[in-house]
């Protein structure tokens, strides 16, 4: 790649960033599409997030992604956030245009894109394991499309709060409770979609799975995991063993990246190339 005075700079802020695959897919897409841009990891040390937006403006950085632990704490430093990011309370993409920094969240739509790509219809009733930023983003997208969602979480108060917020913002019915609550058996049979949004089962703890009894789901339920490393988590392997359709987190990861990349460049991203190369890389790492 030729870097010159016209090269646009994009990047990712978070901490730590050692294992992020975002630079790989964004730079791959720039190269494939002949875009004169570069995407860099910026590991921002704790306590430094307050300087990021002004620093990016000063350096002429046109946009950046945001990951753990700054998805919420970046918000006070932005000029505006999209309705969706406001509803989720978290930002994963920042665009800087004419010095104004605007925050967006592409996680929820990225997940919905992957459902569509897998031919899965928006469910009438879904169960989300977890109540963090990703759960909130997906729950919001499901609710605005008319799905009723139950959040099951290790910390029940957090699940109750997410459900209350989503019900208030969208007007859609939403519930939250502990994931070992005794009343789960009353509704599990009705769930058309179960989504794990916790990191339980993620590399290197690949033998773990959330404590949810899959065999109580009905045979038409779809099980999704937003973890993409490994591609096939223990939860998904068990669901496959029961004959259930499964969706890995790779599609969501690619789609949220595609949406960010298209916002950065104003061009259509080479989605298939990004997904194929990422899948290849993850499979290589698994062997
Ligand atoms: P987060 O805001 O920190 O939320 C984490 C959630 O997982 C919380 O509900 C937390 O429960 C629960 N949790 C964490 N560790 C747990 C454990 N050991 N046992 C039980 N529950 C546990 O994180 P996030 O941003 O939502 O991200 C969650 C996961 O999604 C991460 O693995 C991330 O890599 C993945 N992700 C994937 C994509 C993608 O594109 N595929 C996009 C975003 C995120 P408590 O409330 O009890 O703490």
Image (cartoon, rainbow, N blue to C red):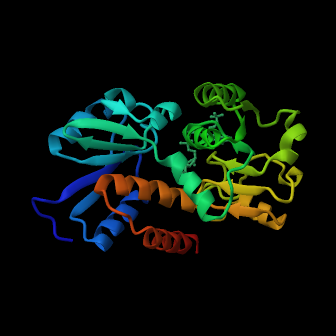
The quadrant in which the C terminus is found is: bottom right
Judged left or right of residue 83, residue 146 is right
Can residue 228 be seen at all in this image of the molecule?
A: no
Between residue 48 and residue 182, name the one nearer to us.
182
Residue 75 sits in which quadrant?
top left
Which residue occupies 36% across, 57% down? Answer: 262
The quadrant in which the N terminus is found is: bottom left
Between residue 155 and residue 166, name the one nearer to us.
166
Residue 29 sits in which quadrant?
bottom left
Instruction: Name above or below for residue 39 compared with residue 44.
Output: below
Between residue 182 and residue 284, name the one nearer to us.
182
Which residue occupies 46% across, 36% down? Answer: 85
Instruction: Name above or below for residue 56 compared with residue 256.
Output: above
Judged left or right of residue 159, residue 94 is left
Give the total of numbered labels.
0
Measured from the top left, where is residue 106 in percent x and y?
Answer: 47, 47
Which residue occupies 66% across, 25% down? Answer: 164
**Residue at far left of view:** 5
Which residue occupies 72% across, 49% down? Answer: 123
- Ligand 1 lies in which image quarter? top right
């Amino acid at each position: 790649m030729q870097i010159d005075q016209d090269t646009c700079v994009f990047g990712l802020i978070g901490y730590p960033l050692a294992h992020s695959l975002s630079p790989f897919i964004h730079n791959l897409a720039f190269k494939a599409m002949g875009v004169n841009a570069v995407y860099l990891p910026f590991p921002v040390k704790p306590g430094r997030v307050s300087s990021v937006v002004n620093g990016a403006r000063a350096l002429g950085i046109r946009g950046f992604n945001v990951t753990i632990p700054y998805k919420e704490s970046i918000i006070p430093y932005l000029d505006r956030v999209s309705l969706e990011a406001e509803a989720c309370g978290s930002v994963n993409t920042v665009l800087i245009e004419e010095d104004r920094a605007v925050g967006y969240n592409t996680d929820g739509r990225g997940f919905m894109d992957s459902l569509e790509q897998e031919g899965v219809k928006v469910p009438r009733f879904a169960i989300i394991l977890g109540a963090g930023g990703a759960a909130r983003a997906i729950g919001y997208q499901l609710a605005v499309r008319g799905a009723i969602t139950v959040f099951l979480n290790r910390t029940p108060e957090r699940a109750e709060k997410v459900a209350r917020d989503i019900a208030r913002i969208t007007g859609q019915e939403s519930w939250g409770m502990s994931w070992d609550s005794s009343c789960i058996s009353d509704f599990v049979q009705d769930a058309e979609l179960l989504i794990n949004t916790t990191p339980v089962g993620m590399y290197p703890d690949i033998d773990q799975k959330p404590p949810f009894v899959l065999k109580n789901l009905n045979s038409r339920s779809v099980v999704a995991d937003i973890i993409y490393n490994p591609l096939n988590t223990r939860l998904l392997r068990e669901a496959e063993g029961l004959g259930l359709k499964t969706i890995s987190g790779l599609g969501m990861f690619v789609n949220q990246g595609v949406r960010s990349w298209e916002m950065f460049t104003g061009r259509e991203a080479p989605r298939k190339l990004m997904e194929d190369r990422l899948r290849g890389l993850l499979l290589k790492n698994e062997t």
